[in-house]
Amino acid sequence: MPPAQREPASPELRSTARLKGLMAAHFAGVDRAARERTAPVAWCTSVGPVELLRALGYEVFFPENHGALLGASRAAGETMGRAHALGYSPDICSYLTSDIGAYLAKKTPLARYGLAAPPRPDLLLFSTNQCREVRDWFEFYGREWKVPVVGVTSFRDVGTVEDHHVDAITRQLEGLVPALEAVAGRRLDARSLEEAVARSRACSDGWRDCLRTSARRPAPLTFFDATIHMGPAVVLRGTAEACDYYLALREELEGHVREGRGTLRRERFRLYWDGMPIWGRLRDLATLFAELETSVVASTYCNSWIFEALDPRDPLRSMARASLELFIARAEEPKQRYLERMVAEFAVDGVIFHDSRTCPNNSNARFGLPRRLRDGAGVPVLVLDGDLNDLRCFSDEQARTNIEAFVEQLEGAGPRASGERARYA
Ligand code: SF4
């Protein structure tokens, strides 16, 4: 039964005010560079080789972040249709269709930061380590604005990351340099690249430490909060500002751990979230889980900006390795091993797989992994149908019913330590 006592969604962290300022300054900085031509502007995919751009003095914009803002502000519902009308299928990435549709409709949630439109790039840089969609997305803008589109065509479904994979990606990264230099109008300096990689690594370590605080009980940070606080790890990776931010956030979270303060007054159950966020329902889902006194304490999605292979002593090879080791680029077996580690590290009682309709790349419920994880790790799993931005693929009523039933199932299963396995939901 759902508990009688209703909990509010998590109270805001003190760092949230700083986060807002940081994100506003980021958008204003890229916008200024594009309008006043004070620095070259590049668009980059969210787990692309941004360190090369930082080392060459680019201001960097991340369209996936724009896609997420379109989803969270629910503007995506209006804009996607414009891209569908242009021949982009409703079945492909709804970030892509939301963003291209917004461009066609001349709409942007960045208006709240004073931007009339996303800053226009001099170059677009992709890596298909996450999906092919990002390349198609960037090529739309390359045709539109007649600017270079360059990138890395990566391996996918990688089992063990071998040296030959790393060699091949390193060669592609090296091959990008002349095009990036030509637009930047300067040569790549080895020291600048090492420094950018060192800052990316520090940002990654800081973000990892923040996320790991939720291995403690009660968790001081939920998945829903983390999707907001990950902003600097995405758009400011490779900058000192991002490193400083995560030092401060970690300190605040560790303070909460020391005081025994979690996001919930009572944390009855702990869950892991696999797959994309449902941006237009973040708050509703955060509230629902809080009502159920259940904390979603960790996620594959937020962990995706942890790059432990980055090493400034070997910048390009370590960037190649970090890119290949990404969860999204891996085969089913390493994915299962990773999830089993997360289940143990965060001591979760169950795992939710969000099967995101338009992102098969980041949906892991389609080839039997939930059942194998249930059997391997001994945790109940729930597969939730939805989408990152297209809310037509998400039923509020069905999701609530399924989540409430799942939590009831956890109640029936008793503490996880009993080893009981609940029914596959
Ligand atoms: S990983 Fe999924 S959501 Fe992200 S850009 Fe690719 S298809 Fe879209």
Image (cartoon, rainbow, N blue to C red):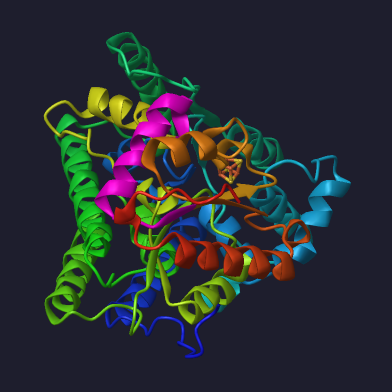
- Can you see residue 358? yes
Q: Position of residue 237 (x, y in %)?
A: 31, 50
- Can you see residue 50? no
| Identity of the residue drawn at 27% across and 64% down | 214
Towards the viewer: 260 or 305: 260
Q: Main secondary structure of the magenta part?
A: helix
| Identity of the residue drawn at 47% across and 27% down | 332
- Residue furthest out toward the top: 164
Q: Is residue 48 magenta?
A: no
Q: Position of residue 262 (x, y in %)?
A: 28, 78
Task: From the viewer's perspective, tell me whether residue 174 is left or right of residue 380.
Answer: left
Decide: is 170 above or below 44: above
Looking at the figure, which quarter contains the N terminus?
A: bottom right
Towards the viewer: 371 or 420: 420
- Residue furthest out toward the bottom: 5
- Residue furthest out toward the right: 85
Magenta part of the chain: 328-351
Towards the viewer: 29 or 249: 249
Quarter-of-image position of residue 67:
bottom right
